[in-house]
């Protein structure tokens, strides 16, 4: 009996400690401290973007020695790995965003955040010009500011290969608004197909969901869509739900090229079981309001009618990135993106511009994993640069005050040591992707040499817990957990926004 009493007491203590810790961090998260004001005597670091690279930098940088300015058209960080879940309402979009001001408000020195789009970077005069392109713009036009250091982390835009219909009729899956648009359009197709008097041909078209691109974005979207159909739509639309079809079109001979052959086969068989039709070696050539035109493996052209088209055919450099490359024609010749050295310094502007994430052309895949590691690395670089600045001031002062030779030599040695900056080293943790019906695939590497490939329900639990733990804040974790519980208890919402 005394054992059970102790067990009970221990359980209460653990629960109380858990609740106490949660309450403490929730309170802390809502009460940012006083910050130092920006100091004109300090160097200015301008950060372009608020995605994976920029946010990872902002988390790690010690702002005491810098005036940091963030410019991004979105005033939040978006946790992209869970974005496909927003397209079907498994997660609410707000649950996977972190306002940039929540990150910057906790820095030692105040950080300026401008919700605006950089329009021009002048690497010679070290200026950035930006403009508010949101609906409400006030009376400010474009603004130009100077920087001492620029961190360029604006990511990429969607690759359309010049097919005009893609932008006009298709949906991308990159931004939060894209996921919300997909959900609205999907429900619109379903409700329109359910309308009295609709012809059979039109019903077939409206209920055909086409995904272009067999990379991880296309695969994860198709997987989420299939889950939505199986778990929810067939219940609330018993006639319509059964007629919904999903087709994934990929130009290459197989999907998910970055995964091992075993996992590719596993994904293909899971998709087959889930009635997702995969058309490999089919290249989309044209898109109109109702059809995608593909070139089939035999070289013929075929029209495929669709209701919803999700375009996940990869990324390309943003116009701003091309403009920056054009300003440094000798050093920037890679069409894939910006060329950087092994310290993430932009070739041609090594003294003042660092570039990271998808905007760069490096040896590793453009992923959140790489961008986050680069951001964290760059934060360490800035912290080191700040130490050098502080020591140089000390040295100057020591010299002025006639300090001893030994003291001056000591400071010089410290400066020399602090100035040795190690190059960036990428550590690949592996690749993970959700493939539907509570299954995921994982290619995990150990120590960069050994690989472990796995697929299935256990991998799904690993996938969920890995991304859950990577969410940036307690707020995000709580909201995502609540969304998952909500869907588990009540299913996904089928109403249209
Ligand atoms: P982004 O995160 O794209 O950030 C770019 C930032 O720049 C944004 O804040 C944007 O608002 C801002 N910006 C744009 N234009 C301008 C401008 N003119 N001026 C100033 N700012 C500008 N990777 C993984 O490793 N694992 C995954 O599971 C994974 N899942 C993904 C799922 C989806 C649906 C998508 C789309 C991507 C996924 N990725 C994943 C890839 C990952 O999101 C990218 O590699 C990562 O976002 C790159 O980070 P970044 O900082 O370079 O760019
Ligand atoms: P991607 O570039 O990886 O894949 C795009 C696919 O579309 C390619 O396989 C390409 O062959 C195909 N394609 C291109 N044009 C086509 C056409 N006209 N017709 C038919 N198919 C066409 O792009 P994705 O999936 O958006 O990924 C971008 C980056 O983000 C990658 O580096 C990826 O690793 C990363 N990412 C990682 C995820 C994860 O780890 N779970 C999830 C999503 C993205």
Image (cartoon, helix red, strand yellow):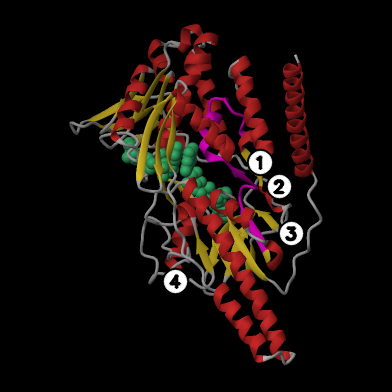
Q: How crowded is mark 1: few (under 14 residues within 10 Å), some or many (20 or more)?
A: some
Q: Which mark is residue 473?
A: 1
Of discs 1 and 4, which sits in the foreground?
Answer: 1
- Is residue 375 inside the magenta stretch? no
Quarter the C terminus occupies: top right
SS type, badge 1 = loop
**344 left or right of 56 in image:** left
Give the magenta part as a residue range: 68-93
Question: What percent of the width, then of the height, locates residue 125?
Answer: 56, 74
What residue sits right under mark 4 in the picture? 348
What residue sits right under mark 3 in the picture? 108
Instruction: Decide which of tag 2 and tag 1 comes sooner along the chain.
Output: 2
SS type, badge 3 = loop
Residues at discs 2 and 1 in contact (Cβ within 8 Å):
yes
Question: What percent of the width, then of the height, locates residue 453?
Answer: 36, 34
Disc 2/disc 1 C-alpha distance (Å) = 10 Å
Among the 4 quarters of the image, the one containing residue 249: top left
Question: What percent of the width, then of the height, locates residue 117?
Answer: 59, 54
Q: Residues within 10 Å of mark 2 (few under 14, many from 20)?
A: some
**488 left or right of 266 in image:** right
Note whether 237 is above or below 382 in the view shown.
Answer: above
Instruction: Decide which of tag 1 and tag 4 comes sooner along the chain.
Output: 4
Instruction: Decide which of tag 4 and tag 2 comes sooner along the chain.
Output: 2
Name the residue at 76% across, 38% down. Answer: 26
Note whether 242 is above or below 287 in the view shown.
Answer: above
Name the residue at 74% across, 35% down. Answer: 22
Q: Residue 102 carries which label?
A: 2
Disc 2/disc 3 C-alpha distance (Å) = 13 Å
């Amino acid at each position: 009996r005394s054992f059970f009493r102790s067990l009970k007491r221990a359980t209460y203590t653990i629960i109380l400690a858990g609740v106490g810790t949660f309450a403490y961090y929730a309170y802390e998260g809502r009460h940012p401290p006083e910050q130092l004001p920006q100091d004109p005597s300090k160097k200015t670091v301008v950060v372009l973007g608020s995605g994976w690279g920029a946010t990872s930098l902002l988390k790690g940088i010690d702002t005491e020695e810098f005036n940091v300015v963030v410019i991004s058209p979105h005033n939040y960080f978006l946790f992209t790995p869970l974005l496909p879940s927003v397209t079907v309402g498994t997660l609410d979009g707000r649950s996977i965003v972190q306002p940039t001001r929540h990150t910057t408000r906790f820095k030692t020195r105040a950080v300026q955040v401008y919700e605006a789009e950089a329009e021009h970077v002048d690497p010679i005069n070290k200026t950035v010009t930006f403009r508010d392109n949101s609906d409400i713009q006030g009376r400010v036009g474009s603004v130009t500011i100077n920087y001492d250091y620029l961190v360029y982390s604006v990511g990429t835009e969607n690759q359309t290969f010049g097919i005009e219909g893609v932008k006009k009729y298709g949906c991308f899956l990159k931004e939060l608004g894209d996921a919300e648009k997909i959900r609205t359009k999907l429900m619109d197709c379903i409700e329109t197909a359910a309308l009295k008097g609709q012809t059979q041909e039109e019903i077939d078209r409206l209920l055909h969901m086409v995904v272009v691109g067999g990379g991880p974005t296309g695969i994860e979207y198709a997987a989420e869509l299939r889950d939505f159909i199986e778990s929810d739509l067939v219940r609330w639309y018993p006639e319509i739900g059964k007629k919904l079809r999903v087709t994934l079109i990929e130009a290459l001979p197989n999907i998910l090229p970055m995964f091992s052959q075993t996992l590719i086969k596993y994904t293909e068989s899971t998709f087959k079981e889930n009635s997702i039709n995969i058309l490999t070696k089919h290249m989309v050539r044209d898109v109109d309001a109702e059809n995608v035109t593909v070139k089939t493996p035999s070289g013929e052209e075929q029209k495929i009618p669709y209701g919803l088209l999700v375009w996940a055919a990869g990324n390309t450099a943003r116009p701003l990135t091309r403009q920056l490359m054009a300003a440094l024609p000798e050093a920037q010749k890679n069409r894939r993106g910006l060329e950087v050295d092994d310290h993430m310094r932009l070739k041609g502007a090594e003294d003042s511009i660092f570039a990271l994430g998808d905007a760069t052309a490096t040896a590793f895949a453009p992923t959140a994993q790489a961008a986050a590691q680069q951001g964290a690395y760059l934060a360490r670089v800035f912290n080191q640069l700040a130490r050098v600045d502080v020591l140089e001031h000390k040295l100057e002062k020591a010299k002025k005050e006639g300090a001893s030779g030994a003291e001056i030599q000591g400071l010089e040695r410290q400066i020399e040591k602090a100035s040795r900056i190690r190059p960036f080293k990428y550590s690949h943790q592996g690749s993970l992707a959700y493939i539907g019906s509570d299954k995921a695939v994982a290619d995990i590497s150990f120590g960069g040499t050994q690989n472990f490939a796995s697929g299935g329900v256990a991998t799904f639990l690993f996938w969920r817990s890995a991304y859950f733990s990577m969410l940036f804040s307690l707020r995000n974790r709580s909201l995502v957990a609540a969304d998952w519980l909500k869907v588990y208890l009540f299913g996904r919402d089928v109403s249209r926004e």
